Structures are given as C-alpha cells and as structure tokens.
Image (cartoon, helix red, strand yellow):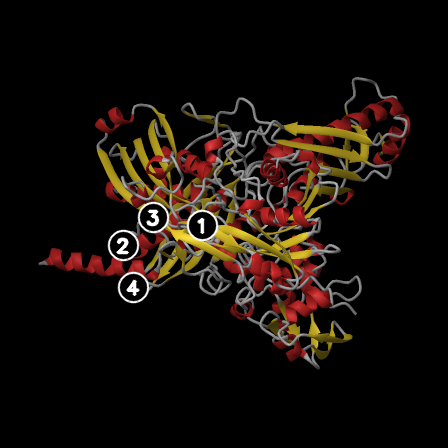
Amino acid sequence: MSDFSVIGKRVHNIDGTEKVTGSGKYTFDVVLPNMLYGKVLRSPHPHAKILKIDTRRAKRLVGVKAVVTGKDTLGHKQGIWRRFPELCDEEILCREKVRYIGDAVAAVAAIDEDTAEEALDLIDVEYEPLPAVFDPMDAIKEGAPQIHEGVELNININRHIEWGDVDEAFEKCDYIREDKFKCSSQAHVCMETHDAVASFGHNGKLEVWTSSQSSYYIQRLYADMLDMSESDIRVHNRHTGGGFGSKFELDSAQFPAAILSQKLCQPVKIVLTREEEFTATKRRTPMYYFLKLGGKKDGTMLAKEVRVITEGGAYTAMGATALYLTGFFSSFPYKYPNYRYDGYRVYTNTAVTSAMRGFGAPQSTFVGESQIDMMADDLGIDPVEIRRKNGMTPNYEVPGQAFIQSCGLHQCLDKIEEHIKKQGKLPPNHGIGVSAYGFMSGGIFNWFNTPYAFSAAVVRINIDGKVDVYSGTCDMGQGSNTTLAMIAAEELGVRLEDVRMFSGDTGICPPDLGAWGSRQTLMGGNAVKRAAAECKQQLLEFAAAKMGANIVYDLDIKDRWVHLVDRPERGVSYFDIVKEAIRGKDGVAIMGRGHYTPHRKGMISPAYSFGVQAAEVEVDPETGRYKLVNVTTAHESGTVINPLGIEGQLEGAIMMAGGYGFCEDQPMDEGKILNPSIADYKLIRSLDMPETDILEIDTYEPEGPFGAKEAGEGLTNPTAGAIGNAVYKAVGVRIYDLPITPEKVLKALKEKEKQQKKAKK
Amino acid sequence: MKKQLKFKVNGQPYEIFVEPKKLLVEVIRDLIGLTGTKRGCNSSSCGACTVMLNGMSVKSCSVLALQANGTEVVTVEGLAKGNELSPLQKSFLDHGSFQCGFCTPGMLMSSTALLAENPKPTKLEIKEGIDGNICRCTGYNSIIRAVTAVVKGEYKEAK
C-alpha cells in the first residue's frame, strides 16, 4: 500500500497558519454584539443543603442584567449514560443540595466580567452543612453520609467482567501474587479553560459557541436540560484549546450561559477561571486497585483477578465508562485464559471524576505493568520475555469480549528489546523500565443512546473541483481535521489543499459522537472515506462515458488525474470531469454521504493499537529525586495517515502520561483541592521533558480507513508504569501509589535500608 | 478614573484611555482587538499571554497596561511581515510545534525574544527560554526542534 499520494506524508495541521499567526479564533475570542459576561457562584461546602438563596442585592448592582439559580432551570439532570435515567444525576445549577466544593449554585450576567464578579459577592446563600465523605473506602461503609438519595453505600455503579474459571485456574498456578495499588487523580489542564457563548434569539432558538470535543453531545444534552428540540440548538466548535477528555459533557460554563441568555435574549459569555478549571470541572478518576495474578514458573500467566474501587466524586459523568474500561484494559495486552474484574464507582463529596485521555487505561496499565514486572523479577524472567510469552497476537479473541484483528505487539517488543540492548551497561542509579499497552479505536457502546450512526459525513465537490467535507467530528488540537482531509483527498485522488473541512458545527454537519475514546480516525475516517467514495463513483461514471473506455477497464483518480488503472497515461483532468459531471447533473454539485457504525466487532471497539515503551530514569538515592532521561516507544497504529501528527501525539502523551507518573497530583483537604493553580499544580515543563524516540511498526487494520487505527490516547497508557519499573531497576524500590514523587522514593529507600540492616543482624 | 496610555503595538501608535487596574493583556485583546495573545491563568504561570515589551518577553497578564506607557509592544500578530511568516513561524509549521494552538502565540513570543537576546542558544538555553510557557499538547520537543532549526539558519528572515 505504498502508492498513496497523500497519506503518509508529513504535513502540518491544516489550521497551522491560523495558529502560528494568532488569527485563529477560539471560543475565548468570540465577541458578539450586545454580549454580556457571566460568572458562576460555587459552593464552599463539600456537602450541604441549600436553605435559601437571596439574589436581591446582586440584582441591584449597576451593570448586572440577570441573576439565576437552580430555580430558574427546569430541574432536569444531565448525564452521558442517558440510557439509565438514574445515572443522569447532575443538575449543574443545584436546587436543593450541593455535593462538592465547586458545585454551581447561581450565575450572574453583567456588562463586564468585573461587575459580574462583584455581583457574586452580593448573592446571599444560606447553607446547612451536612456530614461529608471524601474517600471511597469510607463512603462505601455502612453509616456513611448518603450523597445521592436512594443510593445504598454510595455505590454509583458496578461493573463485572469475567471469562474462564478463575478460581479453578488459581488452584493450578505455581506462582500467585497479590498486590494493592492506588492511582491518583490528574487534571486535564487544557490551555483554553472551559468557555461558552450562548445566544438565545427571540425566536426561542439557541446558538452556542463553545470549546468542546463533541458538539453533538453538547447539543443533545442542552436539548435534554432545556426541553428543546435538538435542531433548535446550533453548537459551533471553533478552534478548541485542548480537551483531553474534559470537554464533552455539558459544563458549568455552557449551561448557566444558556439559562442567562434565555432570560435576556442577549448573548452571554462565560469563561471559567483557571481556579474553576481545577476545582469545578472534571478530572481523572482515582482508583484503589486490588490485584491477584497467577501463573506457571515459566512465566505463563493463567489467571488474573482484579477488584477496583474508584473515587467517583459527586456525579456520574463519564466516570461510569472509565470504570468499565479500566476493567477491560486490566486484561491488556495479554492473553489471560481466565479473568475476573469487579469494579465499583463510589460517590464522594469531591470534584467529579470522569474521562481523561486513556480513559481508565493509564490506571490499569500502571498497576498491571508494575505487577507483571514484579512477577518477572520473582521468577527470574526478563521483563520483555514475560510480555512476549503472554502478549496478544493478531486475530485473537478476548473471550466473549472483543476480537483483535491487527496487532503488532510482538514486533514492538522486539524493537524495544533491541533498544535496551543498545544502551549497554547503564551508569549507576540509572534504570530502564518497560511497559506494554493496547488501546481501542473508538467505543462500540452506546450508553448515550444516540439513534444516529456513530459517525457520518457529507462530501461535496464544487464546480472548481474543490472538495468540502462536512463532519460532526471535533478538532481539539489533535489534528483530526487534517487526518480526515487527508483521507478525503486520498480517496478522491485530489491534493490536500483541494479539501476544505467543516467540522463540529451541528447546524451544517451530520452528527458524530465526537472526539473521545480515540474514535475519530477510524470511525470519522470511515464515514469521510465512504462519502468521498460515493462522490468518486459519480465522477468515474461520467469519466467512463466520456472516455469511451471498454467496460473491462477500471478507472481511478490520482493527483487530479482521472485515468485507466492499467494504462495511467490514458486519462482526463479531474477538474474537467467535475465541470462536465455537474453540467450533466443539471447543475447539482457532486455530493456523497458516508456513515459508520461498528457491527459484529465485539463489545468494546472495532480495532486496537499496541505499543511498548521503555523509560530510562536517573535516581539520586540521597534525595529520592529522579530525572526522566529518555522515553522510547515502539508503537503501531495501523497505516500512519500523518507521521508528523503521530509524533506530536506521542510526545504530547509522554508529557501528560509522564506527568501522571512523575509529578501531577491533586491533594485535598476535606474535599478542597489544595493546588488549584498552574503555579502549584506541578506538570512537566520543557526542562523536565525527557528525550523521546519513536520506533514505528507497520501494521494494517482491515477495519480502518486505508488500514488506520487509534494513535492519540493509547500512548497515554504506558508511561507511569514504565517510570515505576525504571525506578525499581535503578534503585530497587517499588512505589505502589501515583505519582512516584521523590518523597515516596526516598521513604522507600530508607525503608529498604532499614530492612537490609535488620537482615544483617 | 481612566488615564492616558500612549504606546506602540506592532509599530502602530495608540493613544487610549484605560482604567489603572487594566492589565496589558486586557488592553491588547479587548481594546485594541488583537486576540492572538491568549490568557490561560491570569497569574503569570502559563505563559499564554507572553508578548514582547521593548524587546523583552513579558507575561502581559502581570503587567498593568499603564506600565506599558511609552513602550513598544510586539504581539504574535506583529511577527509576520505582510504575508511572509517569520522564520520561527515557518519552522513551527514544518516541525508540527503546535496542536491546539492556544499556547503557540506565547511560545512564539518567548522564542522570538530568546533569539533576539541570544541568537545562538544551546539546547538547554532554548529549554530555559520556554520553561515559563506551558504546552499541554506537544510535549515541547517539537518546539525545541523548531527553534533549533532557526538557530541553525535553516529559515531566512523576510526582507
């Protein structure tokens, strides 16, 4: 498949010039005539009854146009798991009760941000504080404060996954180990905070500009919350300043802005502050992990049992999906003949936990890859070898769950083994840790209950041969518009610059579930490819008639040349064919429709990508401080559509996933996040960033467009595990809870020293 | 009580009246209308609002607008000459040194200021030069490669 003319070229994202010149418009930059500015009042209590909200003083402030509370809403509750009404539990503007510090209780629209801010201080809220609970292990106990009415032991949802006979298999194991781990939270830290401009007209229709990963979800959730018809709501997705899983549920910028605008029939803009972004948007799910792993002396794994309790925070959000996926990906990327998972998501009086890049899999990969290294160490087997022995292979069925077609895990292991050997003997206190992973290319599940195809696209060819692609996908910076434009150009046989993308605008684009679960390349790409193919078919019909070609010849288009496949020199210009085809169609532009919904692909995903990562660290045993020296990743994602795009995804993932392992954390005191600023929230900056190398492995995924699959999210999975394993290799201490901070390393080193002294005595 | 602010932005003189508490970033974005300069934290810790003030990079959310009186400010909109991008802009494109693009104007301004002060920085100096700018998408290395390419003379300044 090397005869691509567009795919596989290193191109910068098609919105690049707008981004490097500052001319690209984000929601943050949207200003409409007559626009007001909104601010949101939030609960200072982790758990309290709202007794009374008095907005009279705020309303009297000059410049304030409206103040709204939960009483101004219809009292509906939003949720992504729309098939289950009991899991739709978030009012956004609370009416009777607040459940975490940051829950919204009122919102103000004023002539400027300063006035709106000032008005917040003039809203008098009377609360009755209630006993609160912060840790899921406490929340699950008898007698713990009940966060949602009727929810026993605060268990929001539980998931069970099982195959084989786990108990019988453990009986047959030569080797069994049980471990406990704790995975921490993580903030998305999108550079553009959550924001929205909502504008109700006097016709009762709503138009919204918002920074989002799924315009369709936002449109549908608005419709639910406002009792409106979907088509009366138009959601625009401009440039989006990052998403990473935080921007596909209706949020406390979007909803209050709409409620205020509805009251005033004026546009209202709300931009969350950085502090609100840390405290009142969603975050990665902290998890308690209990693992039991059994196998034979030769390293063959026979059974794995996993129990997980996750800190849900105050509402369900996408956390229910994270609970499911962490359970499924705990089996990855290995062939466990017997496997059992039980996961519980528990409500707590803390900020809501939900989706974040990797979606439960960074947690499962950290704990799983740590434990497999411990097993390898105990049995005296090389870490790469134990992974090779048990790793997934092409055409493998995860019993009753999933079918894996393409899989390059073993080639990745070979490459990483070579890489490690090449490093030779490492200096003292250096260590290289290995971690293997897999991830999905979009989810098959439809808990959102959409009646639409998962992805859809319309392609239109204009009289000048230029191609317009309409897709409901959202480009949040990952470059999906570029990927989809390349797919359209390749399919149609035109150049990338001939394609113009229209995406994420529910007014003109067919619905697509959006940018989450690494679904856009495969699902959005298939829809675009099919729509383009439909256009191409129409052009080729005209071309065949015009050229008078014998019907045994196949026609194709490459680089704007319509030709006979077997005699490429015989052809006509693409542009001429377009003009004539449109004339022949009575002036109707050439249009094609495409859609994609996975069928007969198991329960999880139509395709999976794989990789193996090796992280090298240098530890200072005196202080516990360590440096990320190098992270090398062998990686496969099917056909690479845009190599430059993949490199960006990979290096960016290392910054984020390395941060998860290395430094990022959200410590709390009684439900209050203690570091809600970029100054205090430690993340990897340029000076901490390790060298990054990529070893790309060729695979081809039959289900993907031109053989492509996921490339953005899976890369977030391995790094924390690789760092943990590297620290162990370097200085012999194992850290069981994230992040792996110098304090923890130092403490473990001291403990180790103590044990060694004891043993000597 | 508004006060007069006289300064140049991207070579264009402005005389405007601003409230003393207005930040430079607010004046650039809201009054002058140059929205390329972003705001990510309002506490000078993310770098998205970086501009050049008399040739030095500053975080425009930590400068009062009136402090810029009599100065020359350059924003990301001032980097290209007509339709010709600056060497750093071109290099950022070729190296894929942006994704969501929200940090990009600040990154470009920090890098431009760095090269103005030190045309031949080492890799460590480049890293130090952008250490005050957070990028959540790229992992920085593509930005460092882009700056390095300019340092090596691979991109020429427009005449």
Q: Residue type at mark 1?
A: Leu
Report the disc number at residue A732: 2
Identified at 75% across, 34% down, the residue is A459
Q: Earlier in the sequence, mark 1 or mark 2?
A: 1
> Is residue A462 left or right of B74 when viewed as pictured?
right
Q: Residues within 10 Å of mark 2 (few under 14, many from 20)?
A: some
Q: Quadrant of the N terminus of chain A?
A: top right
Q: Residue type at mark 3?
A: Val
Q: Secondary structure at mark 4?
A: loop
Distance of mark 1 from mark 3, alpha carbons?
21 Å
Q: Earlier in the sequence, mark 1 or mark 4?
A: 1
For the residue pair A405 and A401, the one nearer the viewer reads as: A401
Distance of mark 1 from mark 4, alpha carbons?
55 Å
Label 1 chain ID = A
Which quarter of the figure has residue A442?
top right
Q: Point out residue A147 in the picture as x, y percentages from the top left corner.
A: 38, 42
Identified at 73% across, 54% down, the residue is A32
Identified at 70% across, 37% down, the residue is A232
> Is residue A247 left or right of A416 when viewed as pictured?
right
**Disc nearest the viewer among 3 and 4:** 3
Q: Earlier in the sequence, mark 2 or mark 4?
A: 4
**Disc nearest the viewer among 1 and 3:** 1
- Residue B137 visible within the image: no
Distance of mark 3 from mark 2, alpha carbons?
36 Å
Distance of mark 3 from mark 4, alpha carbons?
38 Å
Q: Determine which residue is flagged by label 1.
A: A51
